[in-house]
Image (spheres, rainbow, N blue to C red):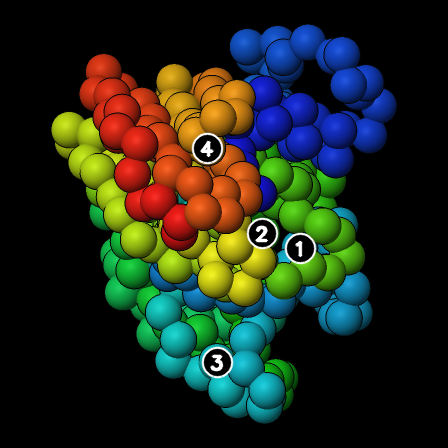
Amino acid sequence: MKFSGAMVAGIALLLSLGTASAAAADPEPESAQAQILATNFQLPFPCGQAWTGNSNQSSAHQSYEIDFNRGSTAGADLGDTVVAAASGTVAISAHQGSTNGFGNLVKIDHGSGWSTYYAHLNVRSVSAGQSVSQGQKIGTVGNTSRPGNNISPHLHYEVRQGTGYPANVRQAVFNGTTFGYPNQTLTSRNCGGAATNPYTAEEVCGSGYKVIDSAALGTSGTVYLLYNSGNGNNCVTTLKKTSLGTATATSAYLEVQGSARKTDSGNFAYYAGPVTAAAPGKCVKWGGKAGSSVYDSPFEHCGS
C-alpha cells in the first residue's frame, strides 16, 4: 500500500476517531490526533520485521495496551531487539520489582504529554535521561515481571498521553495508521528515519515482477522498470531515497509504443506507482521524478 499524505491523515482519523467522513478536514493543529500523527510512531522493532500484536489476550490489559510476539513457539522472541517507536528522552529505565507487573521497563517521553512504555524486557540498553532516536535499540524482548509472576516472553507496549492511568492510554498509531485492534500483524517501517526505503521495487509491483532496468534520480530516488514473464506485463515504480515518510512530489510513468502514457503522480511518502501495462512485441518508454530530478527513457526493451 502506498502512503500519500492524504491517505496517512485520512486513514488514521477514520480508524481512531470513527466519526470522520471521507471529506473531513485535517485535524486541528493542537488536537490530540494531530499531535500523535506529528509524533510519527513506528513499530518498536527493527525495519522489515513482522510482529503480531494483541490487546485482548491478557486479563491485566487496560484499554489499548498491546502484547507483541513473533515466531511459532512461546519462547521464540526471547532476546529479540526492541527499538524506540519515536525519538525522545528516556524517563524510566529500571526493574519495577514488586511495584507492578512490568518487570524491566523503559518509558520514553516524546513531548506534548506523549510517552511510550516497553515492558517485560530481558535487557535494558538505555538509561534514564538519555536522548534516543527513532529506531534506536532500547532493549530486548523478555519475560521479567513481579516476583512469582511467570509469563512467556513478549513485549508489552503502551502509548499514553498525560496522567491518570488507565484513562490516559491512547490507541497506538504506527506509520500513520491506527493499530487494527484487537489484533493485527504488521511489518515494521521503523528504519531509523535515514536513507533506507522500507519498500523494494519488487514489493511495490507484486509477485512475479523482476527488475530489468533502473535509473538514478540524483540523490532523491530511483525509478525502476520491471517485467513479469508470467503475464507479460511491464511495471514502473519510483522509490524515494530522501524525505522518507513525508509526502513529497513523486511520479512514475510507462508508455507502450502506440498507446497512451500511464502515469502515477502526486505527493507520496515512499514511492510512486505501480504503473503496469502489457507490451507484447512492442517497445516501452518509462521514467519518473523525485525531488528535482527527472528521468525519461527512449523507446527500448522491445518485446519484454
Marks 3/4 in contact by CB < 8 Å: the verdict is no
Q: Earlier in the sequence, mark 2 or mark 4?
A: 2
Mark 1–mark 4 distance (CA, rounded to whole Å): 51 Å
Give the residue pinned by disc 2: 158
Mark 1–mark 3 distance (CA, rounded to whole Å): 19 Å
| Element class at badge 4 | strand
Which of the two residues, 188 or 120, is positioned nearer the viewer here? 188
Give the residue pinned by disc 4: 256
Identified by mark 3, the residue type is: Asp
Q: Earlier in the sequence, mark 3 or mark 2?
A: 3
Mark 3–mark 4 distance (CA, rounded to whole Å): 48 Å
The nearer-to-camera label among 3 and 4 is: 4
Identified by mark 2, the residue type is: Glu
Mark 2–mark 1 distance (CA, rounded to whole Å): 5 Å
Give the residue pinned by disc 1: 65
Label 2 crowding class (10 Å Cα cut-off): few <14, some 14-19, many 20+?
many
**Residue 238 in view here:** no
Which of the two residues, 251 or 256, is positioned nearer the viewer here? 256
Identified by mark 4, the residue type is: Val
As drawn, 107 above or below 124: above
Residue located at (25% from left, 43% from top): 214
Q: x%, y% of residue 267?
A: 46, 20
Residue 110 falls left or right of residue 212: right
Give the image quarter of residue 183.
Answer: bottom right
The nearer-to-camera label among 3 and 2 is: 3
Identified by mark 1, the residue type is: Glu
Give the residue pinned by disc 3: 77
Q: Earlier in the sequence, mark 1 or mark 4?
A: 1
| Element class at badge 3 | loop
Mark 2–mark 4 distance (CA, rounded to whole Å): 50 Å
Outermost residue to the right: 19
Q: x%, y% of residue 145?
A: 54, 77
